Image: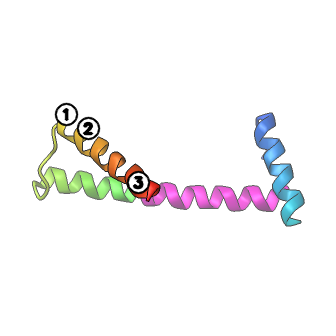
Amino acid sequence: MEVHLKPETQAELARWTAETGRSAEELVEEAMAGYFDELAQVRGTLDSRYDELKSGRVPPIEGPEALARLREKSKAHRADRRG
């Protein structure tokens, strides 16, 4: 299989290869495996949340309320980071 990377990605891969002494093939293989593991985990989370909504165990949140909650969470996170 042949993979084509953007020049910026190719440069980053070359930098990591030089820093770690590992081959580009190893780094790409590890990165792809990690990506697929994370994708499967996210998919599982989304599926379980959908099942909870469909079963009625969790009530849906309307868009404006969801957006307000996200903004508040983001605001609190920024405040925590500032100390």
Expressed as whole percent of the image width and height from the top left, the position of residue 41 reads 44, 60
Q: Based on the displayed image, in which of its 4 quarters is residue 60 positioned?
A: top left
Q: Amino acid at mark 2?
A: Leu
Near mark 3 (Cα within 10 A), the count class, few <14, some 14-19 or many ≥20, is few
Rounded to the nearest whole Å, what is the CA distance between mark 2 and mark 1? Answer: 5 Å
Expressed as whole percent of the image width and height from the top left, the position of residue 14 reads 86, 50
Q: Amino acid at mark 3?
A: Arg
Near mark 1 (Cα within 10 A), the count class, few <14, some 14-19 or many ≥20, is few
In which quadrant is the C terminus drawn? bottom left
Q: Amino acid at mark 1?
A: Pro
Describe residue 32's horizontal placement relative to residue 45 as left or right.
Answer: right
Q: Is residue 38 visible?
A: yes
Residue at 89%, 58% (x, y): give it: 18
Instruction: Point out which mark residue 36 bears.
Output: none
Does dot 1 land on a helix, a strand or a loop?
helix
Which callout, 3 or 2, points at the residue further toward the start of the chain? Answer: 3
Contact (Cβ within 8 Å) of mark 2 with mark 1: yes
**Magenta span:** 22-42
Q: Which residue is mark 3?
A: 43
Q: Which residue is mark 2?
A: 67
Rounded to the nearest whole Å, what is the CA distance between mark 1 and mark 3? Answer: 25 Å
